[in-house]
Amino acid sequence: MTNLAFSTLGCPGAPLDEVLELAAGNNVSGLELRTAADEFTHVGLTAAERRALRSRIEDAGLEILAINSYVKLCAVEEQPLEAHLELAADLGARGVRVFPGDDAPVPGTAPTGDSPTPGEIRALDRVTSASTDVRILLETHDSHSAGARMAALCDLLDTEAPGHNAKVIWDSAHTWSHGETPAEALELLQPWIDFVQIKDEDSTQDYKPVAIGAGDYPIDELLQVLQGSDYWLSLEWELKWHPQLPSLAEALPATWNWISAR
């Protein structure tokens, strides 16, 4: 039985009650909570608000896979990683989603494309200095969308910081858009994968998200290579950034049909 989650990116600004109703009505057992000032999950919550939020979600029988931050682990910035890690711990979440956000050239592709990059060294420093057991969940995104580059960063972490608490959220559409088949990306990332994000995309339009079943994403191949594993699948429905998409209320049943028809 597939464990399905969804990100609240798919219902931007929705209250907790609506999120719980969507989960209960669609056989969903996990959540990714987008963390921002315009959501019910943010680092400014009081201790009492955190306890209440955790209690409501646990009482609904849901697991929080990730607090989805916008921290860029490789970037020169003052994003509050520690504050997000504390929030995740208070809510009982498995980890904090972060982006790589490295602005250096891909190693080996330019004269300045050193390996590891200065940004990857910053990521190493931030991982080793984190003061919590909550996982830092690196999403295959932006500078490290390709599984090969993310695997290289994870190898660096393993070598220089054994016992670190970083894992990978495999955004399977991103690795596919960078030329890696599901099988190739899984082979590269398997030692570090925490869970797998899914969505459908139209490869003829710069890999833009489209309604479930309307795109070219090879869901059959993904499910085949994941057969026998226990990874969660999480629908990353990007309605916040692509308001032309169907609602999450439509996308969740369509996702189940997309999965179960295979």
Image (cartoon, rainbow, N blue to C red):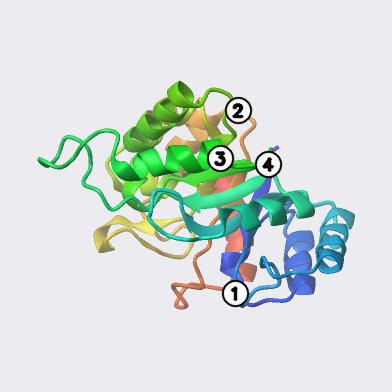
| Mark closest to the chain's N terminus, 3 or 2 | 3
> Is disc 3 surrounded by few (<14), some (14 to 19) or many (20+) residues within 10 Å?
few
Residue 75: % across, % down: 38, 54
- Residue at point 72% right, 59% down? 26
| Mark closest to the chain's N terminus, 2 or 1 | 1
- Residue at point 53% right, 35% down? 128
Q: Is residue 252 left or right of residue 147?
A: right
Query: Is there CB contact under 8 Å for labels 1 and 3?
Result: no
| Mark closest to the chain's N terminus, 1 or 3 | 1
Q: Is residue 175 above or below residue 148?
A: below
Q: Secondary structure at mark 3?
A: helix
Residue beneath label 2, please? 229
> Whole-Å distance between the Cαs marked 4 and 2?
28 Å
Q: Nearer the viewer, mark 1 or mark 3?
A: 3
Out of 230 and 87, give the one closest to the viewer: 87
Q: Is residue 48 above or below residue 186?
A: below
Residue beneath label 1, please? 12
Q: Which mark is residue 132?
A: 4
Q: Secondary structure at mark 4?
A: loop
- Residue at point 38% right, 49% down? 174
Q: Is residue 80 visible?
A: yes
| Mark closest to the chain's N terminus, 1 or 4 | 1
> Whole-Å distance between the Cαs marked 3 and 2?
32 Å
Residue 6: % across, % down: 63, 57
